[in-house]
Image (cartoon, rainbow, N blue to C red):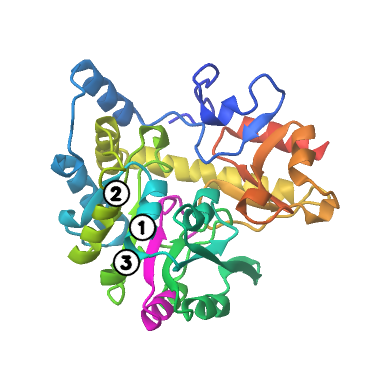
């Protein structure tokens, strides 16, 4: 659990590091961390590979992995689920695109928050649906959904689905019970299906509790909750996630939307999920402590750089940085010329911002800050 000494990712074909390969630019963009996975995960994967049999494994039959999810939901959120509610997917991106196919028809519209994760923003158009953007606004130093805009959007007859992100990416806010209740009220009032992307929900750095959408009784039967071990335990490359869908009919429609197109979650991802949710609590807690210190350091440092500002996020390892004070047209170019490669704000819906990944060693983060401060 030495987060100060991450593994060397050179020549590993890492998506994050390949982008700036051969350039003196530090990659702080795509949302995976630089940390070595917890030892129980690596030990289990080695054991499975050494077994030398990597044939077909139907995810629904991997009962240990499903039971691990059930255990995790009870431990983390006090949510008692039935394992038959679980639908395994090879990532949340395929999952929310499946939701678009399952619950919308040509001419329908999908509500999304902005700014947001680029593949989520792209999902409606990919599925020949209208995208209806609801802004995230700053209120009392914290980013929240514009609930009036959400109400207006949901009232449109063609809006059939709301793909929500909680905790919010890139702004890092965690929905309070009151905020989630308001979303539930709006969706129920206007018969809008709620698909909640909660992939970062175990990375809460404040004294707050995550409330899964599907755990709210009033909308459980009209909900799809998307989760994964991938962000929390740095196993995103294993392509494994899951949806929790309490209602049998909703679940069947969701599964049907992926038939013949969406592959099974793979066996190593299932093994990693099982171990992450049952054997890695100490590693998990230590990582949260490390990320909290990184976040606090980075927020203070960014707010001390002329032209930049950032609010402290509740969760994730991502910081949404306001660069409007720089007075430059291209904030991404400004960063890259200083030797730092963040996620471009324009991809999330606001060209005056950029997103920094602080899931790295503190020394690496200090190098990033030093370059931005020049």
Report helix, strand or loop for mark 1: helix
Report helix, strand or loop for mark 2: helix
What whole-number distance in Å separates the C-alpha atoms at marks 2 and 1? 8 Å
Residue 97 is inside the magenta segment? no
Q: How many other residues sit within 10 Å of disc 3, few (<14), some (14-19) or many (≥20)?
A: many
In percent of width and height, residue 328 lies at 84, 49
Tell me if residue 196 can be seen: yes
Residues at discs 2 and 3 in contact (Cβ within 8 Å): no
Residue at (43% x, 79% y) in the render: 186
Residue nearer the viewer, 210 or 119? 119
Left or right position of 322 against 46: right
Q: Nearer the viewer, mark 2 or mark 3?
A: 2
Residue at (54% x, 47% y) in the render: 292
The first of marks 2 and 1 along the sequence is 1
> Where does label 1 land, which residue?
101
Left or right position of 12 against 181: right
What whole-number distance in Å separates the C-alpha atoms at marks 1 and 3? 15 Å
Task: Tell me the quarter of the image containing the N terminus.
Answer: top left
> Where does label 3 land, which residue?
223
> Where does label 2 land, which residue?
258
Residue at (60% x, 66% y) in the render: 136
Compared with 53, 88 (above or below) is below
Residues at discs 2 and 1 in contact (Cβ within 8 Å): yes
Residue nearer the viewer, 151 or 168? 151
Report helix, strand or loop for mark 3: strand
Residue 192 is inside the magenta segment? yes
Q: How many other residues sit within 10 Å of disc 1, few (<14), some (14-19) or many (≥20)?
A: many
Left or right position of 320 against 103: right
- Based on the displayed image, in which of its 4 quarters is residue 247 positioned? bottom left
- Chain part drawn in magenta: 183-207
């Amino acid at each position: 659990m030495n987060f100060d000494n991450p593994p060397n990712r050179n020549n590993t074909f890492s998506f994050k590091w390949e982008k700036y390969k051969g350039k003196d630019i530090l990659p702080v963009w795509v949302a995976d961390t630089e940390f070595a996975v917890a030892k129980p995960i690596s030990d289990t994967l080695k054991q499975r590979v050494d077994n030398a049999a990597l044939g077909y494994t139907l995810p629904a039959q991997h009962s240990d992995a499903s039971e691990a999810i059930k255990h995790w939901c009870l431990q983390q959120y006090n949510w008692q689920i039935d394992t038959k509610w679980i639908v395994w997917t090879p990532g949340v991106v395929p999952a929310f695109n499946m939701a678009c196919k399952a619950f919308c028809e040509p001419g329908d519209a999908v509500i999304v928050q902005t700014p947001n994760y680029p593949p989520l923003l792209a999902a409606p158009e990919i599925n020949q649906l209208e995208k209806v953007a609801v802004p995230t606004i700053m209120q009392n130093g914290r980013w929240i959904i514009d609930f009036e805009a959400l109400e207006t959007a949901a009232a449109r007859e063609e809006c059939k689905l709301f793909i929500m992100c909680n905790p919010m990416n890139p702004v890092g806010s965690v929905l309070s019970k009151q905020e989630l209740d308001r979303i539930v009220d709006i969706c129920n009032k206007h018969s809008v299906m709620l698909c909640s992307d909660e992939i970062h929900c175990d990375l809460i750095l404040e004294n707050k509790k995550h409330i899964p959408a599907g755990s709210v009784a009033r909308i459980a039967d009209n909900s799809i909750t998307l989760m994964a071990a991938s962000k929390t335990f740095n196993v995103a490359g294993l392509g494994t996630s899951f949806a929790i869908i309490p209602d049998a009919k909703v679940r069947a429609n969701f599964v049907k939307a992926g038939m013949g197109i969406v592959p099974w979650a793979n066996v190593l991802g299932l093994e990693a999920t099982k171990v992450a949710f049952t054997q890695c609590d100490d590693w998990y807690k230590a990582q949260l402590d490390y990320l909290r210190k990184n976040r606090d350091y980075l927020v203070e440092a960014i707010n001390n750089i002329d032209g930049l500002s950032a609010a402290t996020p509740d969760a994730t390892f991502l910081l949404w940085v306001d660069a409007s004070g720089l007075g430059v047209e291209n904030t991404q170019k400004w960063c890259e010329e200083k030797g730092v490669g963040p996620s471009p704000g324009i991809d999330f819906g606001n060209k005056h911002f950029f997103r920094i990944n602080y899931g790295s060693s503190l020394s690496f983060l200090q190098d990033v800050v030093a370059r931005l401060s020049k």
